[in-house]
Image: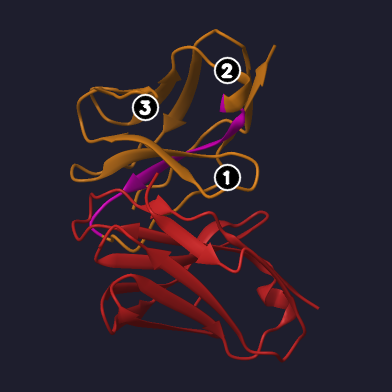
Amino acid sequence: DAGITQSPRHKVTETGTPVTLRCHQTENHRYMYWYRQDPGHGLRLIHYSYGVKDTDKGEVSDGYSVSRSKTEDFLLTLESATSSQTSVYFCAISGPQYQETQYFGPGTRLLVL
Amino acid sequence: DAKTTQPTSMDCAEGRAANLPCNHSTISGNEYVYWYRQIHSQGPQYIIHGLKNNETNEMASLIITEDRKSSTLILPHATLRDTAVYYCIVRGHNFNKFYFGSGTKLNVKP
């Protein structure tokens, strides 16, 4: 399995609270991604990074920000959590070529009350 | 990226081969076919991928038709631990697009 860890694995928070999720990789892959998975929607891309300090928006980026100060870490921040952001969040990594496989982390379950 | 069509669910007897079909009739020449699975609430697990030729690894075989409009994932000897949702994905130059869709729920039964 690819060396990807996510923390925390479970979190319960209240509406309006800032939340940061961390993805850590030991594979030295250039690309990192954040997805959310909700019933009936499959996986949807939130943000991705193609290098240190290089990030871009995905399909559902509103309400989320990201940062990547080191190759191995990709942080996802919910500036002010809302109940609609209750979801399972997955981090993924891949090499730089488009045909390269994405490997996924174990996920973080977030509940916003 | 081309969209894919998969059956909602399938059953397979333990020890038998599981053949999971996928239709991707709008696939273009440079798009790869990927298969992932997701067991319960775990992260999606990569299984196999291919462009034109059939592929085999320790987990499964991927059969792609000559016109590339469909493919079949084969788990040669399904076990109870193979019960999962299997996703067929077609991926092209937009590396940031990895559309999982609804997948096929494979139920392996004793």
The secondary structure type at the circle numbered 3 is strand
Disc 3 + disc 2, Cβ < 8 Å: no
C-alpha separation, residue under disc 3 versus residue under disc 1: 17 Å
Asked if labels 3 and 2 share a chain, the reply is yes
Which chain is red in the picture?
A
Which residue position holds label 2?
B79
The image position of residue B5, as x and y in percent, is 49, 37
The residue sitting at 35% across, 44% down in the picture is: B90
The secondary structure type at the circle numbered 2 is loop
Which region is colored magenta? B82-93
Q: Is residue B92 magenta?
A: yes
Does residue A98 show up? yes
Amino acid type of disc 3? Ser
Q: Is residue B19 magenta?
A: no
Which residue position holds label 1?
B102
Q: Colour of chain B?
A: orange
C-alpha separation, residue under disc 3 versus residue under disc 2: 22 Å
Look at the picture and state if B109 lies above or below A45.
Answer: above
Does residue A62 show up? no
The image position of residue B46, as x and y in percent, is 40, 41
Which residue position holds label 3?
B71
User: Mark 3 or 2 closer to N-term?
Assistant: 3
The image position of residue A88, as x and y in percent, is 62, 62
The residue sitting at 60% across, 33% down in the picture is: B84
The secondary structure type at the circle numbered 1 is loop
C-alpha separation, residue under disc 2 versus residue under disc 1: 22 Å
Q: Chain of mark 2?
A: B
Asked if labels 3 and 1 share a chain, the reply is yes
Amino acid type of disc 2? Thr
- Of badges 2 and 1, the one in the foreground is 2
Q: Chain of mark 1?
A: B
